[in-house]
């Protein structure tokens, strides 16, 4: 989702909105300082991942924000349902990205 997030940042920039993209490729150790810093500077957080939003980085970021700097936010990722296999759909991964709203 890093590439998609950078694309989204570019789209927002064209609309006059500054966005910061942070690559959180691990949750242990979790960089709580950068999460809190970004929340204080932007006053909103979008957490994006290309799989289930039920655990992992979404839960970790939400916990840090709730404890240190509650701000409005949005979660981009696969909701709590079984996704289709790319083998079951013509168009492969790009079709799944669109159906699961994993686009910029």
Image (spheres, rainbow, N blue to C red):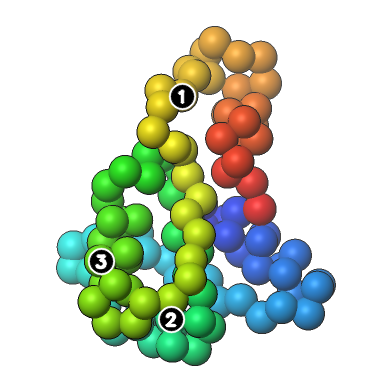
- One can see residue 95 in this view: yes
Horizontal side, residue 79 vs residue 96: left or right? left
Question: Above or below — where is 54 with respect to 15?
Answer: above
Task: Please report whichever mark, 2 or 3, sits nearer to the chain's N-terminal start.
Answer: 2
Task: Name the residue located 48 percent from the left edge and 18 percent from the top edge.
Answer: 85
Residue 98: numbered disc: none
Q: CA distance from mark 2 to mark 1?
A: 31 Å
Q: 68 or 103, which lies in front?
A: 68
| Other residues around mark 1 within 10 Å, as few (<14) / some (14–19) / many (≥20) | few
Q: 72 or 64, which lies in front?
A: 72
- Quickly name the residue at label 2: 39
Q: CA distance from mark 1 to mark 3?
A: 26 Å
- Quickly name the residue at label 3: 63
Question: Above or below — where is 16 with respect to 50?
Answer: below
Residue 36, percent across and down?
35, 82
- Quickly name the residue at label 1: 83
Residue sitting at the far top: 88
Task: Name the residue located 65 percent from the left edge and 35 percent from the top edge.
Answer: 98
**Label 1's element?**
loop
Task: Please report whichever mark, 2 or 1, sits nearer to the chain's N-terminal start.
Answer: 2
**Label 2's element?**
helix
């Amino acid at each position: 989702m890093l590439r998609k997030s950078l694309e989204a940042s570019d789209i927002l920039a064209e609309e006059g909105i500054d966005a910061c993209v942070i690559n959180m490729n691990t949750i242990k150790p979790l960089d709580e300082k950068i999460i809190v810093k970004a929340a204080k500077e932007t006053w909103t957080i979008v957490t994006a991942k290309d799989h289930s939003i039920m655990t992992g980085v979404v839960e970790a970021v939400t916990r840090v924000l709730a404890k240190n700097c509650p701000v409005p936010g949005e979660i981009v990722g696969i909701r709590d349902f079984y996704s289709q296999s790319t083998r079951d759909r013509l168009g492969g991964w790009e079709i799944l990205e669109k159906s699961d709203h994993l686009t910029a």
